[in-house]
Amino acid sequence: MFVTGKILRFDEVRGYGFIAPDEGHEDVFMHANDLLSEKYLYQPGGRVEFFVEEGEKGPKASEIRLITPGAVAESAPSVRRHVEEAAPASGSAQYAQDEPTCDVLSSSEFRAEVTEILIGADEALTAAQIERIRTSLGQSAVAHGWVDTSVS
């Protein structure tokens, strides 16, 4: 059965975590072998779509596809700012109340972080490409309240 949900936690080193299905059913086990993208992209709060199978110890996700990334990028530790710990895998209703949050960045901090990430991801990007990507991300960040536009 194909479903959507939110990543509760994912340990990139150990290669497993848990997803809270949108339907509110039991949390679903996820394993790195079932991810369709790079595992560092799967972070708490990220939205995914997946198939549910019956595993040895309960429901297990397969063919896990990222819909939206989580709030934290492990590959860029400087972006991670005072992030609260994700809730335990059990009790997805409680998790909804204790969802991880992060500090709001100033516009200049956001631009610097995005630039650092883009250059680290692909040194072949041109300045014009970086500026277009940064502008689009900046507009989205403002719309989501991730950037404080009153501070530059």
Image: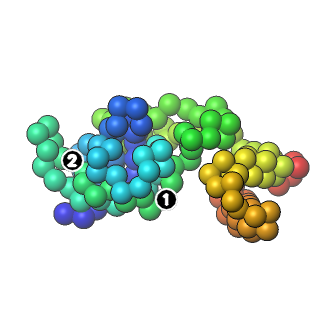
Q: Residue furthest front?
A: 124
Q: Is residue 53 visible in the rendered structure shown here?
A: yes
Badge 2 local density, few (<14 within 10 Å), some, or many (20+)?
many
Position of 144 with respect to 134 (left or right) is: left
Total numbered circles: 2
Badge 1 local density, few (<14 within 10 Å), some, or many (20+)?
some
Element type where label 2 sits in the image: strand
- What is the distance, in whole Å, between disc 1 and disc 2 at their CAs? 20 Å
The residue identified by callout 1 is 68
Name the residue at 46% across, 35% down. 86
Specify the amino acid type for callout 2: Lys
Element type where label 1 sits in the image: strand
Name the residue at 69% across, 54% down. 123
Mark identifier at residue 60: 2
Q: Is residue 143 visible in the rendered structure shown here?
A: no
Location of residue 34 in the rendering, given as x and y in whole percent from the top left corner: 28, 51
Location of residue 128 in the rendering, given as x and y in whole percent from the top left corner: 79, 68
Location of residue 145 in the rendering, given as x and y in whole percent from the top left corner: 69, 54
Position of 91 with respect to 108 (left or right) is: left
Query: Between 52 and 117, which is closer to the camera in this rendering?
Result: 117
Q: To which quarter of the image does residue 17 belong?
A: top left
Query: Between 6 and 53, which is closer to the camera in this rendering?
Result: 53
Name the residue at 21% across, 47% down. 60
Location of residue 12 in the rendering, given as x and y in whole percent from the top left corner: 42, 37
Residue 115 higher or lower than 44, as above or below: below
Residue 101 higher or lower than 121, as above or below: above
Cβ atoms at labels 1 and 2 below 8 Å apart:
no
Upstream in the sequence, badge 1 or badge 2? 2
Name the residue at 88% across, 49% down. 152
Residue 89 higher or lower than 7, as above or below: above
Specify the amino acid type for callout 1: Thr
Residue 11 higher or lower than 31, as above or below: above
